[in-house]
Image: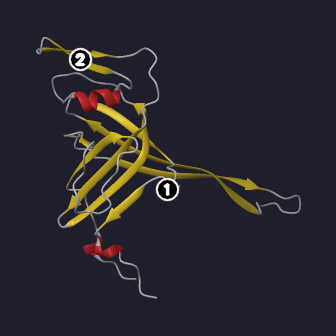
Amino acid sequence: MANDADNVRVGLNGSVYIAPKGTTAPADLSSPWGTGWVDLGYLSDDGVSLEYSTDSEDINAWQSLSPVRKVLTSVNMTLGFTAIELKTSTITLYFPSATMEDNAGTVHKLSIPAAPTPDERAIGLEWRDGDITNRLVVARGEVTDRGAITIGRSAAVGLEMTVSAYADSAPEIAVWLSNDPAWAAPEA
């Protein structure tokens, strides 16, 4: 197959969405993110990193110096990003089980618990390159790693987070939708 520069994609723009676990995600690329989905807003210019990895274990045999089989032992998918809009949806995602309350309408209080409970959410990622749109939906995900919050004069305060995807009952770990013509199934 020849090289085709028309198949090279970039993420020119996009958004990360969160919703309560169990919230229905759009089933196509034209439907809006429905009720319950919240756009996290501006992210750092690093965008979003998507990592997918598998681990396997060798099965060895007495009669062979090399493995006779490999068995898949785990699948991991993570999304990493840094939210630079400090608002209730981003702060309470960074601090699990935290609650926000208004005091007299001008002072807001974030209560960060000493013993947070698990905080599974539905996660959506959408990005565009011209007319090409991609949507990745993780039905069950949770922030499992957080970077330091740096407060300084020369950069936006950012909430660096890594979301781990968990298998859903389907048993998909995620669903990726795209209208990219390069994804068309090859003719048989």
Which residue is outermost to the right?
Answer: 63
The answer to whether 153 appears left or right of 143 in the picture is left
Report the residue at 35% width, 55% height from top. Answer: 136
Given the image, on which type of amino acid does mark 1 rest?
Answer: Glu
Residue 119 in view, yes or no? yes
The answer to whether 154 appears left or right of 92 in the picture is left
Name the secondary structure under disc 1.
loop
Given the image, on which type of amino acid does mark 2 rest?
Answer: Glu
Report the residue at 26% width, 20% height from top. Answer: 100
Image height of 53 relative to 153, above or below? below
Disc number at residue 172?
1
- Viewer-nearest of discs 1 and 2: 2
The answer to whether 33 appears left or right of 80 in the picture is left
In the figure, residue 101 lies in which quadrant? top left
In what quadrant of the picture does the N terminus appear? bottom left
- Most foreground residue, 15 or 138: 138
In the figure, residue 109 lies in which quadrant? top left
- Most foreground residue, 147 or 121: 121
Residue 158 in view, yes or no? no
Mark 1 vs 2, N-terminal side: 2
Q: Residues within 10 Å of mark 1 (few under 14, many from 20)?
A: few
**Residue 80 percent location from the top left of the image:** 36, 42
Name the secondary structure under disc 2.
strand
**Residue 33 percent location from the top left of the image:** 24, 51
**Residue 112 percent location from the top left of the image:** 35, 17
Q: Which residue is mark 2?
A: 101
Spatial separation of the CA atoms under disc 1 and disc 2: 36 Å
